[in-house]
Image (spheres, grey):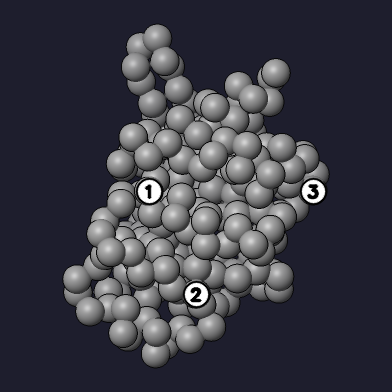
Amino acid sequence: NKTTIDCLSSLKKVTYSNYSTVLIDNASTDGSLTLIKEQFSQIKILPLEKNYGYSGGMNRGLKLIKTENPDFVVFLNNDITVASDFLTQLINGAKEYGKNNIYGPKIYYTSNPKKIWYAGGKVNIGMGRIAHRGIRRYDNNSFSKDIITDYISGCCLLISWDNINKLNGFDSRFNMYGEDVDLCIRAKNIRSK
């Protein structure tokens, strides 16, 4: 599918040198895996026999790379195209603020790359509300400062290998939506202990 190919094409342009890519295929039926294997032979592909949802698919990807013992893992949706320096910026954040945090970038609308989709997240458990900071606003300097946020969107999330393992990955009871918020809340809870 074109969306996934655009994502993988953007990853090929990443300037950070020490990374590898794993594509988790949640039982796609559009035949795109054949084309992806031809165009992106350098990536690992984990074809799943059924659709396990975001959490289940990502957790199976973690099992695949378990023996590699990486320093960090980036979870990235296939509908994201990344800036060539996105990984450098995320790693620089971890170097500056510590590897026990979870990091994420600003995310823009594909249809309007100056308009913000995500620049941080707010969680109000008492009210049952989750909201994106900056959503539908045009980017400006106030959204370019490093901030502490209640959660990082699973669309693009960097976490240390140690922490994702302490958390046992994503809670697969969240098929889609909320799994990233849950992960961040659980991470905050283990960090405060």
SS class, disc 1: helix
Specify the amino acid type for callout 1. Answer: Gly
Q: Earlier in the sequence, mark 3 or mark 1?
A: 1
The residue lying at 68 percent from left, 26 percent from top is 191
Which residue is more in the foreground, 116 or 151?
A: 151
Query: Pointer 3: what residue?
Result: 95
Q: CA distance from mark 2 to mark 3?
A: 27 Å
Tell me: residue 142, above or below residue 60: above
Query: Splitting the image into 4 quarters, where does residue 143 fall?
Result: top right
Work out which residue is located at the far bottom of the displayed protein and give it: 38
Crowding near the residue tagged with mark 2, few <14, some 14–19, many ≥20 C-alpha atoms within 10 Å? some
Res. 44 mark: 2
Tell me: residue 89, above or below residue 162: below
SS class, disc 2: strand
Percent coordinates x, y for residue 83 in the rendering: 55, 65
Query: Pointer 1: what residue?
Result: 56
Tell me: residue 31, above or below residue 117: below
The residue lying at 60 percent from left, 49 percent from top is 158
| Tag in front: 2 or 3 | 2
Crowding near the residue tagged with mark 3, few <14, some 14–19, many ≥20 C-alpha atoms within 10 Å? few
Q: Is residue 183 left or right of residue 15?
A: left
Q: Earlier in the sequence, mark 2 or mark 3?
A: 2
The residue lying at 52 percent from left, 62 percent from top is 64
SS class, disc 3: helix
